[in-house]
Image: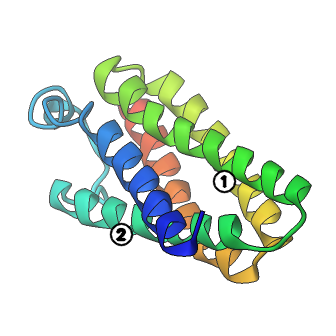
Amino acid sequence: MNNPVKLVLSLAMTVITGLSGGFFSVNDIPGWYAHLNKPSWNPPNWIFPPVWTSLYIIMGYSLFLVWKSSAPVRLKRIALTLFSIQLLLNFFWSFVFFKQHAMGWALAEIITLWIMILLTIFAFEKISSLAAWLLVPYFCWVSFASFLNYTIWRIN
């Protein structure tokens, strides 16, 4: 498979998966979520779609860098598996938090996601330093989201 196809598939996979997870929250943001107590530092709702879309694009490019690399297949397989697991966890967080209204379980899920992102960064670093560094903003945002999830859970 040539690199342009890999790039398009990498971007499409991350963006489509991410945006699909967001569909779980569409109806619950103006309803259930709007009525929750939130900390004063909670970002406005409009900030989440552009931030997540940007992060999914960056994640897709990071994935592409690893996929197209000439690294040993074993290293790539581990890195791509970790990436897939963290992307799946990312997808399901919205379901657990917004559809199930299970804030405590969502916290456990996002902590697992946070760990998997970190492991993915370490695996990507063995293949492409740039690919690893491109995941750092995502790691930081999920760190923030984890603390926000925790705070919302505690005050509700």
As drawn, is 68 to the left or to the right of 148? Answer: right
Rendered image: mark on residue 9: none
Residue indicated by mark 2? 54
- Nearest to the observer: residue 148 or residue 119: 119
Name which residue type carries label 2.
Ser
Secondary structure, mark 2, is: helix
Residue 26, position as x, y percentages in the image: 16, 36
Residue under pointer 1: 117
Residue sitting at the far left: 30
Q: CA distance from mark 1 to mark 2?
A: 17 Å
Q: For residue 124, what is the image quadrant?
A: bottom right
Q: What quarter of the picture does the N terminus occupy? A: bottom right
**Which residue sits at x=81%, y=63%?**
122
Q: Residue at x 35, y 38 (%)?
A: 21
- Residue 97 as seen in the image, left or right of residue 147: left
Q: Residue 49: horizontal and vertical position, in percent?
A: 24, 58
Q: Please tell me in which quadrant of the rendered image residue 17 appears.
A: top left
Against 146, residue 50 (above or below) is below
Amino acid type at image mark 1: Ile
